[in-house]
Amino acid sequence: MLLGTWNLENLYRPGGPSGPKDKAAYEAKLAALAAVVTALGPDVLGVQEVGEPEALADLLETVGGTWHAALSAHPDGRGIRVGVISRTPLEVLADTRAYPVGLRPVQADDSGATSDGSGRGFLAVETVTPAGPLRVAVAHLKSKLLSYPGDRFFPRDEGERARYGAYALYRRAAEATALRALADELLAGDGRERDVAVLGDLNDEVQAATTQILLGPPGSELGTRGFDTPDQGDGARLWDVAPLIPAERRYSRINSGRRELIDHVLTSHRLVHRLTSAGTSTDVGPGPGSQEELRLPSVGPDPAARRNEPGSDHAPVWVGID
């Protein structure tokens, strides 16, 4: 089977403040997204930045075939949320934005306002595959693209930039902690026997402190002794599949000309040992195994700049599973 994650970049129906301005631009976006989904051929795909549920339904109709979908009921202030599409039926296990017990609210802006939960809900589902039950959590953590009071995307000065960068980091770290708590529930200490995956746009790279929070016990990295040597931590570990992606394609977005891998697939001990391949792809011809260069735009600090552009500014990240 093929399991993956993809940020669809502002999948709204036309006419609203964030979606395409007209039907033609919307249909072009749907066609571009559907071409990638068709070429990729996922069995289960976590998705981010879904606006109206009807927009996801439009995309699946454009792709064609039989799909099952589940969406979080907790969008952010812009109305975007996470979800899952699957070839097999889905059972929702959790849909939450709560921080775990013990984690206090974090400062969110200069006014002293605090954030007491994730900006976008985390969705956990279960589906039954030919290899047995698969539990998946999908997330979209706080962005590194900063916004400022008054809907500004540019700071008044460098002090404001630094403060709001810190606030974003506080929130992303708290959200990563909450996502790890949800993963603990799905693993139930039994990752040696359970197929569990955490998928999503984590808005930071593999070695970032916020991403590392999700891994669990030390040694939870491919290529370390913890991978080849069984120990008591295996039941709780999550393994980031990034090292399995060919180095020349180990990125999922281009930010101001810099390649970044900010979209991640993390898997339990049982699942990671059945992975056969991993990659990123926006190719619509050869399929997920293509080694062609990713065709991604370079994005800047203003997310509205691509409002009428087709496709997505992210590449899907996927794994093949035996």
Image (cartoon, rainbow, N blue to C red):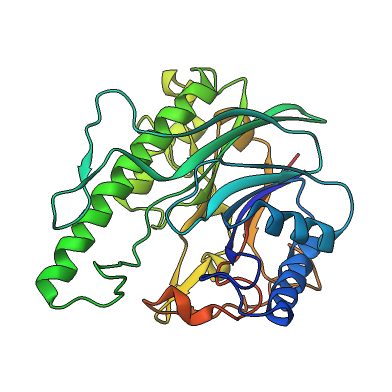
The image quarter containing residue 197 is top right
Residue 172 position, x and y percent, is: 32, 49
Q: Considering the image in quadrants, where does the N terminus appear? A: top right
Residue 14 position, x and y percent, is: 65, 72
Position of 83 relative to 255 (above/below): above
Residue drawn at (63%, 78%), measured in percent from left and top? 293
Q: Viewer-proximal residue, 269 or 35?
A: 35
Number of disc labels = 0
Q: Viewer-proximal residue, 61 or 47?
A: 61
Residue 261 position, x and y percent, is: 47, 62
Residue drawn at (30%, 41%), measured in percent from left and top? 174
Q: Viewer-proximal residue, 173 or 189?
A: 173
Q: Is residue 99 left or right of residue 296?
A: left
Q: Residue furthest left?
A: 159
Q: Residue furthest front?
A: 15
Q: Is residue 115 left or right of residue 44?
A: left
Does residue 219 show up? Answer: no
